[in-house]
Image (cartoon, rainbow, N blue to C red):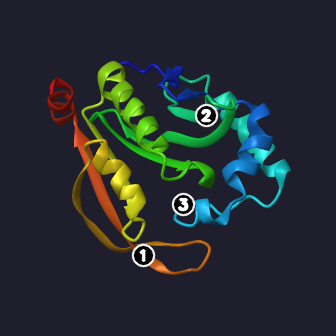
Amino acid sequence: MNQLGSKILETPRLLLRPFRASDAEQAFANWMSDSAVTRFLTWEPHSDLSFTRELLALWEEEAQSPETYHWAIVWKENGEAAGDISVVAADMRSESAAVGYCLSRVLWGKGVMTEALSRVVEYLFGEVGFYRIEAKHAAENAASGRVMEKCGFQKEGVLRAAYRLLGTGERVDLAVRAVLRPEWEQRRAK
């Protein structure tokens, strides 16, 4: 494994780069304060821009570590930070990573997250050397599951009532999906 950290990655429409403290206003306005975006996430919408500023300053510091894989999703068309994608957990012994992501509601349904996740998966397998990449989503969040499927993630199972939504307290099932490096290599070869 090569611990390479959050190198700048590009796609036709996106720039994936480490967060900067100066992204706070855009992050707050574009997705971090939006309850629709955060509905299925592990954190509640930000109600105070100062909290977002402090968080992004921390993320900017963390980006210096080669063990951190966390990117701002920048929409090239307007240069704005429009989302977040990261490795939320990694096990170097087993060469496995868990990814998470969120995106501004104005870009939903345009293939943006599929584009970002595909590029991150390519980097994590092709350059960093992970063997397995997994992700979980609330079973009722079908759009997130479709993003994963388009990127080659196979459904492995459902964890019943495994997550409690912060906004409502409702317990939801979590679908677990993963892609293995040989599967990714086979898809690339086609």
Judging by the rendered image, the residue that carries numbered circle 3 is: 41
Residue type pointed to by label 1: Val
The numbered disc on residue 75 is: 2
Residue type pointed to by label 2: Trp
Please indicate whether residue 67 sits to the left or right of residue 83 in the image.
left
Question: Alpha-carbon distance for marks 3 and 2?
Answer: 21 Å
Please tell me which of labels 3 and 2 falls first in the chain: 3
Q: Residue drawn at (51%, 81%), measured in percent from left and top?
A: 170
Q: Secondary structure at mark 1?
A: strand
Q: Residue drawn at (34%, 27%), measured in percent from left and top?
A: 122
Q: Is residue 102 above or below residue 13?
A: below
Please tell me which of labels 2 and 1 falls first in the chain: 2
- Name the mark nearer the viewer: 2 or 1: 2
For mark 3, does the 10 Å Cα neighbourhood hold few (<14), some (14 to 19), or many (20 or more) residues?
Answer: many
Residue 133 position by quadrant: top left
Please indicate whether residue 63 sits to the left or right of residue 55 in the image.
left
Residue type pointed to by label 3: Leu
Contact, CB < 8 Å: mark 3 with mark 2? no
Q: Residue drawn at (67%, 37%), measured in percent from left and top?
A: 81
The numbered disc on residue 172 is: 1
What x and y, as percent, mark residue 164? 50, 74
For mark 1, does the 10 Å Cα neighbourhood hold few (<14), some (14 to 19), or many (20 or more) residues?
Answer: some
